[in-house]
Amino acid sequence: METTTPPSFIPKDTVQAGSVRKAAKNGLLDLAALASVVLFVVSGVLGVGVLLYDQYLHASAASKIEQLGRASAAFEPALIQELTRLDDRMLVANEVLGKHIAPSAFFRMLEQTTISNISFISLDFDGSDPQHMTIQMDGIADSVNSIALQADLFSKVGMVTSPIFSNINRQTDGVHFSLSALLNPSAINYLAIVRGATQSLPQELTNPTSEVQSSLSPFNGVPEENTASEGSQPTE
């Protein structure tokens, strides 16, 4: 007796399409799971790498700090501190000397350049501002020409700038006048004077014997021909 399979009411094409869609869906799920596993592994590797690099940085920093400590100990920190304090004191001293003025240089110049026909009777020295120092002086001269000569000498020295002679008045004891002028700050700066003296010292010591001989010579400044001719003249 033959058995017959009852016919199905579901088309075969529909069954095949459903199985294809199910297989595609399972493939996407597998791909997503694989991607998740890969991302998890990569993130784990990166985390371990960051942790190891952080530990390396800490170890390297500790090693460098230890090396720096050994190097600092080798340079004797107490000596370094002492030298640092000495350097600070020298800088402060240099700054103070750079602002210090030497009025003695002005008085020396005044003594050397004042002509014999002029006498100063008063002096007002204002050095409150080292960059703008002024002098006010009153004096007596034999004549107006002496005042003009004194003004020319002051202008040539370079220490006195912009000299102004005023209140010129002829009286019985001479020509009275007033002088106001500015002072060149670099000309009476103590540090500049010391440096200039230090630089000129080797030049003065290059030939000291000739200077001593010339100072001891009785004919200093007299030509040899004149001395010889004077010595050859017969005495009457």
Image (cartoon, rainbow, N blue to C red):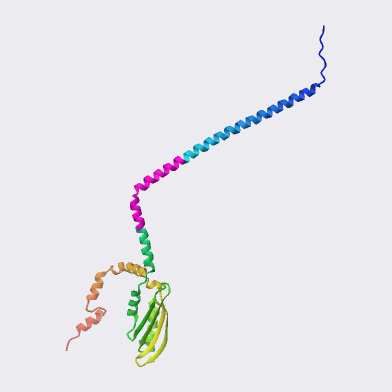
Q: What residue is rendered at 23% in x and 73% in y?
A: 213
Q: Position of residue 85 (x, y in %)?
A: 35, 57
User: Farthest residue toward the top?
Assistant: 1
Q: What residue is rendered at 32% in x and 79% in y?
A: 111
Q: Position of residue 157 (x, y in %)?
A: 38, 77
Above or below, 76 relative to 135: above
Magenta segment boundaries in residue numbering: 58-85
Q: How many marks?
A: 0
Q: Per the image, is 213 magenta?
A: no
Q: Per the image, is 77 magenta?
A: yes
Q: Nearer the viewer, residue 61 or 161?
A: 61
Is residue 154 toward the left or the right of residue 37 in the image? left
In the rendered image, which quarter contains the N terminus? top right
In the rendered image, which quarter contains the C terminus? bottom left
Q: Nearer the viewer, residue 5 or 27?
A: 5
Q: Position of residue 233 (x, y in %)?
A: 20, 85
Magenta part, dominant SS: helix
